[in-house]
Image (tube, rainbow, N blue to C red):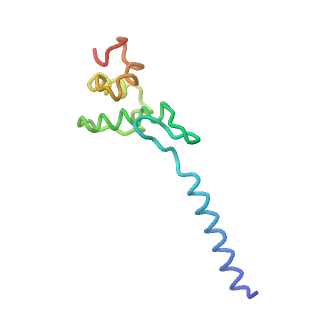
Amino acid sequence: MSPRLMIVAGVAGILFCGLATSAGAGGIQCKNGFQLVQGSWLSTPYCQDALVAQVAHEYGFKATAAEVRNNPMFKQRLCRFIGQDIRIKETCSEVTPVPGRGFY
């Protein structure tokens, strides 16, 4: 086997391993506030915050999932305005001071 062919085969092997690894590590999959974990959809804070950001965006607020996740006061302010939306009512009940209400 020529050295050039060995190099090409080595590079192809490395690229194949990299593609196989990245396909398996696709990241967190969220759908309507639920995360896909081992084939089951579970409610997680990560995906719930993403849903709050999505609903806020639909109402015209400039909100990202990272901002909602990293800033509890920002999440509370969003929930004051849109917390009565049925999709996020339960999530917002955790950060609003009045139990059972999405605003104050």
- Identify whether 2 is placed above or below 58: below
| On-image quarter of the C terminus | top left
Q: In terms of image quadrants, where is residue 18?
A: bottom right
Residue 58 at what x, y percent from top left? 26, 38
In this rendered view, identify the residue nearer to me: 67 or 26: 26
Total numbered labels: 0
Q: Residue furthest left?
A: 60
Q: Residue furthest bottom?
A: 2
* Residue at screen point 69% across, 85% down: 4
Q: In terms of image quadrants, where is residue 52?
A: top left
Q: Residue furthest front?
A: 39
Residue 22 at what x, y percent from top left? 57, 57
Residue 62 at what x, y percent from top left? 29, 38
In this rendered view, identify the residue nearer to me: 10 or 90: 90
| On-image quarter of the N terminus | bottom right
- Identify whether 28 is placed above or below 92: below
Q: In terms of image quadrants, where is residue 19?
A: bottom right
* Residue at screen point 64% across, 64% down: 17
Q: Residue furthest top?
A: 98
- Identify whether 5 is placed above or below 17: below
Residue 48 at what x, y percent from top left? 43, 32
* Residue at screen point 50% across, 36% down: 41
In this rendered view, identify the residue nearer to me: 86 or 53: 86
